[in-house]
Amino acid sequence: MPHGETTLQQQIRLALGTRTDLRLFRNQVGQLPDPRTGRPVQFGLARGSADLIGWRTITVTPQMVGQQLAVFTSIEVKTERGHVRPEQHAWQRTVSAAGGIAGIARSIQDANDLVR
């Protein structure tokens, strides 16, 4: 991740970290060789998954008054010039289609708007 995205991601995590209805975690995705065998080891949630993942707690419907629900939340952090890869678009579509919150944040305001 380019330096600008790393900085922006940290700023978003700090800005949204004070919310009691939201929990976000860094999701580092990639592959490295196993030091003993040299075989590739995949890490992270899934190819194309977002930089920040977690949930937003919401209270729902009159029938469920008082119950809370965790809504899967996925925020891909990009600078103004950062490009979203096809597998990242696919991840966002999949999360959204399943009822989760997913999107691109190019600023703290974008991240806040996503989880509002």
Image (cartoon, rainbow, N blue to C red):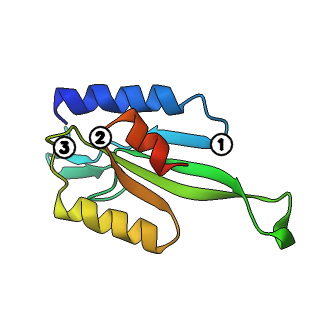
Foreground: 27 or 41? 27
Q: Find the distance from the CA under tag 3 to the CA under tag 2.
A: 28 Å
Q: Quadrant of residue 32?
A: top left
- Camera-side mark, 1 or 3: 1
Badge 3 density bin: few <14, some 14–19, many ≥20, Cα 10 Å: few
Q: Residue at x 64, y 56 (%)?
A: 70
Front residue of this view, candidates 42 and 13: 13
Q: Amino acid at mark 3?
A: Leu
Between disc 2 and disc 1, the foreground one is 2
Q: Earlier in the sequence, mark 3 or mark 2?
A: 3
For the point 33% across and 64% down, the residue is 91
Measure the alpha-carbon separation of dots 2 and 1: 22 Å
The N terminus lies in quadrant: top left
Q: Which mark is residue 53?
A: none
In terms of secondary structure, where does tag 3 sit?
A: strand
Q: Amino acid at mark 1?
A: Asp
Residue 107 vertical placement versus 41 (above, below): above
Residue type beneath disc 2: Arg
Picture residue at 16% right of the left edge, 43% below the top: 82
Does the residue at mark 2 contact the one at mark 1 (Cβ under 8 Å)?
no
| Spot occupied by residue 84 in the image (x, y as percentages of width and height) | 19, 54
Left or right of 91? Residue 115 is: right
Tell me where residue 2 appears, x and y as whole percent: 16, 32
User: Which residue carries the number 2 mark?
Assistant: 106
Helix, strand or loop at mark 2: loop
Which residue matches tag 1? 21
**Against 77, is 45 above or below?**
below
Label number found at residue 32: 3
Mark closest to the chain's N terminus, 2 or 1: 1
In the rendered image, residue 112, in percent from the top left (x then y), is placed at 48, 41
